[in-house]
Amino acid sequence: MSGYQAYGRAQNTTENPRSTEYRLLAQVCGALTRAKEGKRGTAEFVDALLWNKKVWDAFIIDLSSDGNQLPRELRAQIIGIGLWVGRETIQVLDGNGDIDALINVNRTIMEGLAPQPSAAAGAARPAPAAPPAGNRPVGSGLSVSS
């Protein structure tokens, strides 16, 4: 089963797509941050980068589909970011890129996906959670059916 199919199946649960995407990017950010703190070239380092790329590849596929309901211009902009993520990932793996830039892009997208707190409730934005070791989702899409 591809990451895109796994995301589609998971999306049919009670969590809304934006929450799923936020949670997934938070998990990927956690993995990238741990990889940054570790040694370049280790399995953890490479796995985190490739996981991030798979997530963005799934976003690109999802955003390219006819059924995606985001405005065309926004879809094109996010696809452009996804293509940049792919190029930057290769640069980081080659020792020339900036893993912090990948982390920052994910965090910026998370800000746009985060639930807006209710003024009356004073709700706080959910904190990013790290995934359990070895239990990572492999792909996602950006709010296609909401």
Image (spheres, rainbow, N blue to C red):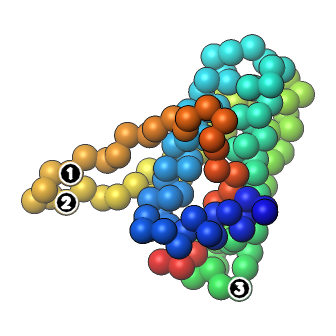
Identify the residue shown where x is 73% and y is 59%. 3
> Spatial distance from mark 1 to mark 2, Cα to Cα?
6 Å
Residue 79, quarter of picture: bottom right
Q: In this view, does 53 lie above or below 67?
A: above
* Label 2 environment density (alpha carbons within 10 Å; few <14, some 14–19, many ≥20): few
The amino acid type of the residue labelled 2 equals: Ser
Identify the residue shown where x is 51% and y is 35%. 130
The amino acid type of the residue labelled 3 equals: Asp
Q: In this view, does 46 lie above or below 104?
A: above
How many numbered marks, from 0 up?
Answer: 3
Task: Quarter of the image for the N terminus: give it.
Answer: bottom right
Rendered location of residue 65, percent (x, y): 72, 79
Under circle 2, the secondary element is loop
> Spatial distance from mark 2 to mark 3, Cα to Cα?
33 Å
The residue carrying mark 3 is: 66
Regarding residue 69, the answer to whether it shows in the image is yes
The residue carrying mark 1 is: 123
The residue carrying mark 2 is: 118
Rendered location of residue 7, percent (x, y): 64, 63
The amino acid type of the residue labelled 1 equals: Ala
Residue 88, quarter of picture: top right
Identify the residue shown where x is 37% and y is 40%. 127
Chain-order first, disc 2 or disc 3: 3
Chain-order first, disc 3 or disc 1: 3
Q: Do the residues labelled 3 and 1 touch (CB within 8 Å)?
A: no
* Image side of residue 36 versus residue 143, left or right: right
Q: Are marks 1 and 2 in contact (CB under 8 Å)?
A: yes
Under circle 1, the secondary element is loop
